[in-house]
Image: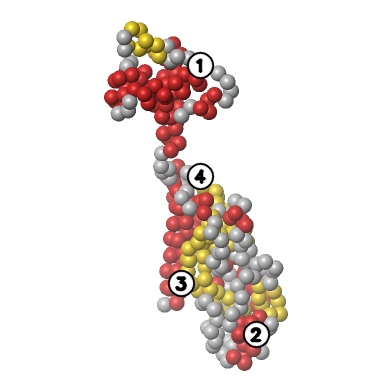
Amino acid sequence: MKDHDYLALDGYSMHVFLTVLEQGSLASAADKLGITKTVIGNCLTKLRSVFHDPLFVRTGGQEIVATARAESLGERMRLVLADMQQLTAEQVFKPKQTALHFTVGTNDFQRDLILPELYRQVASETKEFSLRTLISEYPSLELLRTGKADLLLSPVAPEGTDILYKRLFIDQPRCFFDGNARQAPRTLADFRNARYVGLNLVDGQRVVPLAAPIARELEQQVAIRVPNFSDMASFMRGSDLLAIAPGMLRMGALSGFSSSIPPFNLPSVFMFMLWHKRHQGDPAHQWVRNQLEAAVSGVMERVKLAKA
């Protein structure tokens, strides 16, 4: 047999061969399979060219007998077909039998707020779970496209048909400050005369325009820029600095600070879960996405209780 002959094999021809081998007759095999003897003959001709063996020979009349090679091929073909069947069978995801390793691109806001809950849920339901985070204010879609991340948590809905997404929640901005170091700003003038700590304006990351005129105005009042929300705390503590940040940070990095709702409208903060299209039908990935949504629901319930 030539090295590449095996590429001519197909499951249907092997199934026909095994039926003929079991029935010991072309006519009986045709009846069982519901096909004509011509179709059976074509399948056997293909296999004869692959194995360079007649496979079946006539003993007189319509009776046939398998060659020694055909007899030896029978059990091995059954194993091959069983493997092919398993290969095409629908995947069944069993968390307790699975080791999962996920990388999530996120900013520190979602990392601190959501991912601990996700880890606890998934780790309790799986054989093994490891979670890695890649921190960026606006995680790049290339992390998904290159396979460097399995999921992204981002305030920006993606562009591109290869990236899928689902909105997780909507938050409202609040003004954070150290209540031990300064009074709460109350009027628009208080906000305009204040100095702020804000996030770095890194090229390629800040892709959401500051639509509200007041937001653009206050952006000019930023005195200190830091890479993450959690880094704001050390600068705000003991100072008169303000920070305009997602309100849910009250339960995270800015939990030790006072906060208030600004007396002007600011754009809502959206949060999306993003994944690549190639993972859409993967049972394990689907399960983790469902777990993430459940984790967000748990966090939102705690937010409601904190407001009550």
Residue 45 position in % (x across, y down): 44, 21
User: Which quadrant of the rendered structure holds the C terminus?
Assistant: bottom left
Q: Earlier in the sequence, mark 1 or mark 2?
A: 1
Q: Earlier in the sequence, mark 2 or mark 4?
A: 4
Q: Name the residue under label 2.
A: 217
How many dots with numbers? 4
Q: Which residue lies furthest to the top in this view?
A: 60
Relative vertical location of residue 80 with respect to residue 127 in this rendering, above or below: above
Q: Nearer the viewer, residue 70 or 188?
A: 70
Q: Mark 3 points at which residue?
A: 303
Q: Earlier in the sequence, mark 4 or mark 3?
A: 4
Q: What residue type is labelled 3?
A: Val
Q: Nearer the viewer, residue 180 or 108?
A: 108
Name the residue rendered at 47%, 19% in the picture. 48
Tell whether 205 sits left or right of 68.
Answer: right
Q: Name the residue under label 1.
A: 52
Q: Which of marks 1 and 3 is nearer the N terminus?
A: 1
Mark 3–mark 2 Cα distance, whole angstroms, equals 30 Å
